[in-house]
Image (spheres, rainbow, N blue to C red):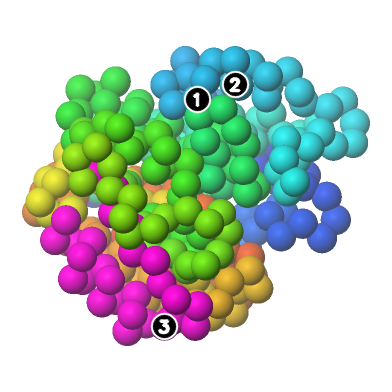
Amino acid sequence: MTTLIFTHPDCLAHDTGPGHPEGPHRLAVIWEVLDRDEFKGLERRPAPEATTGQLARVHDRAYVDAVLAAMPVQGYHRLDGDTLLSPGSRGAILRAAGSVCAAVDAVMAGEATNAFCAVRPCGHHAEPARAMGFCVFNNVAVGALHARERHGLSRVAVVDFDVHHGNGTQAMFAQDAGLFFASTHQSPLYPGTGASWERGVADNILNLPLDPYSGSAEFRQAVERVILPALEAFAPELLLISAGFDAHARDPLAQLGLTGADFEWVTRKLVEVAERQCGNRVVSVLEGGYDETGLAEGCAAHLRALTRA
C-alpha cells in the first residue's frame, strides 16, 4: 500500500497571464518536489478528464456548458476579475477535476492507501454557477459527489487548510447532511466568507477563522480541539483534503505563519482519523500556495505524512 500521484502535463497549459500568482510555475515546483529521492518512487498516473456528468453533480449544467464553450482560440477569456481561460485551459480544468474522481476510485479499490492530486487550477472557491478566485470547477466537491454516486458512500468529509475559505465547497455541502466540510482560514481575507456561525443544515459545516499573523499554536489548537473531534463524530467513509499551502509564513497573499512542520502535523492528524474511521482512505488535492519556497516546503511535508501512513 502506498501513495498514488495523479497529475498531467495539460495542467501546465492553463495560462493565466504574466504576473498572475496562480501560474504554471506552481505545478513545476510540485513536480520538482516529486522528483526528490524520497518521493520519486511513488507511482504517477495521468489525470483523466472529468466528464460533464461528473461536473454537473455539483455545478449547474448550464454553467459547465458555458465554461467549456468559452475557451478562447487566442488570448484570454475572463470568467471573473482574477479567473481566466486560455487556449490551453480546457484540458487543465477537466483533468484537475477528473484527477480527484480517479484518485477516489483507486483508493476505494484498495490500489493505494491514499492519493495526492498534483493539479491546477485550484477549485475550492468555484460555486455551483460561478467561477471565483482562480477556480473554475470545484475539484474536491466533484470528487466527493463522485464517491457517493460511484461507490455508494453516505458520509464524505472534506477538510480544507488553505489560507482562504473554501466558499464554493461550503456552498455545495451546506444543505446535505451526508457531506462534512471543515476549514481553517485567515479572516478577514478573500473571499470574506467562513464565519464560525455558518454551520450547515446538520452542523456539517465547521469554520475556524484565524486572525492575521496567527501561527502554529493557534492553528494546531483549532485543529486539535475542534476539527478533529467533529470529524471523528461525523465518522466519514472517505476523507478528502483541500491542501492549500498559502498559510505558509512566506506566502504573499496572506498573513498566517505556518511552516512545513505544521502541514506535516495536520496531515498526520487527519490520516490518524482516517485510519480509525474509514480504513485509511484519504484523497488530497492541491489548492493554493503562491510562494515557491513555501509551496515546496508545505507540499513535501504533506507528502511525507501521506507516504508514512
Would you call the spot at circle 2 few (<14 residues within 10 Å), some (14-19), or many (20 or more)?
A: many
Instruction: Using the image as rendered, state which of residue 47 and residue 141 is in the foreground.
Output: 141
Residue position marked by numbered label 2 in the rendering: 64
- Looking at the rendering, the stretch of residues picked out in magenta corresponds to 204-230
Is 108 included in the stretch rendered in magenta? no
Kind of residue at disc 1 = His
The span from disc 2 to disc 3 (Cα, nearest Å) is 38 Å
Kind of residue at disc 3 = Gly
The x and y percentages for residue 262 are: 37, 76
Q: Which label's residue is closer to the chain start, 2 or 3?
A: 2
The x and y percentages for residue 201 are: 24, 37
Residue 40 in sight: no
Q: Who's the residue at 39% across and 43% down the image? A: 170
Q: Which label's residue is closer to the chain start, 2 or 1?
A: 1
Q: Who's the residue at 25% across and 77% down the image? A: 221
- Name the quadrant containing residue 30: bottom right
The x and y percentages for residue 160 are: 39, 55
Residue position marked by numbered label 3 in the rendering: 215
Q: Who's the residue at 63% across and 69% down the image? A: 253
Figure check: 230 above or below 65: below
For mark 2, give the secondary structure.
helix
